[in-house]
Structures are given as C-alpha cells and as structure tokens.
Amino acid sequence: KVAPSQLKIAGVGINLTSSAPYLITGVHPHARVSEGIPFIAHLGDEVVAVDDIALQDLPIGDVTALMMGPETSTLVLKIRRHVQEDVPGGAGGLSKYDMYHVVVFSVKRKLLQEG
C-alpha cells in the first residue's frame, strides 16, 4: 500500500475544450499507448463519458477530476468520433455521408512530461 504522500496523481494525456461538448484539442505523444493497447484519440473527438459517467452536464473541473487518479489506475473513456465517408451519389459521383462512431477505450493513467 502506498502512503498518501507518495501517491502520484496522473491523467490520460488529452486536452479538452473548456465546456461541453468536450472535444479533444490536443493529445500528448506518449498518451497513444497504454499497456501496449493503442489509445488512439483524434483531435475533434468528443469525450462523452468517463467510467460510464456522462459529461454533457458537468463543468470542466469535474470532468478533469474524473480523468485524474492514482498512477497506473484504469479508467474507461467513451468517445464519439465523427467520420465522413464517400458513398455513391447521383450521376456516378460521390456524396459525403456523415457518421458517428462510439469508441470505448480502457486507459491506464500515467505521468506524462510536457513536450
């Protein structure tokens, strides 16, 4: 057991907009892998839940608190990703089709240095 004074608080290495919807505005380069499993966040992804807690009505301080925790502890991020695909359109051309995928990542918190 770790003494509280030795407990290191860590996060998942993403920056978010300051209010809902919480869009990812930055990703730390070392945040892309957690225990060998790719955590692939894209700029513009919307974080909709942390550990099954919906974020749409929470202030950014509460969202940040949910993402922070003891180093190596695990959290689950539910991310809504906008995807635009080309589909056959009229006159043999292509049309853009907007889709949204929900992606769920289990991520270990870690200490990440700036830069």
Image (cartoon, rainbow, N blue to C red):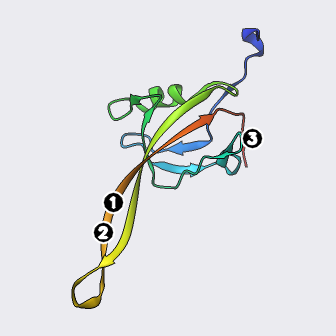
x, y (%) of residue 45?
45, 51
Residue ID for mark 1: 99
Quadrant containing the N terminus in the rendered view: top right
In which quadrant of the rendered view does residue 22 lie? top left
- Front residue of 107 and 70: 107
Q: CA distance from mark 1 to mark 3?
A: 35 Å
In percent of the image, x 65 and y 49: which residue is there?
32
Q: Are marks 1 and 2 in contact (CB under 8 Å)?
A: yes
Residue 16, relative to residue 93: is it above or below? above
Q: Which mark is residue 113?
A: 3
- Callout 1 secondary element: strand
Q: CA distance from mark 1 to mark 2?
A: 6 Å
In percent of the image, x 60 and y 49: which residue is there?
27
Q: Are marks 3 and 2 in contact (CB under 8 Å)?
A: no
- Please tell me how crowded label 1 is: few (under 14), some (14-19), or many (20+) other residues with Cα within 10 Å: few
Q: CA distance from mark 3 to mark 2?
A: 39 Å
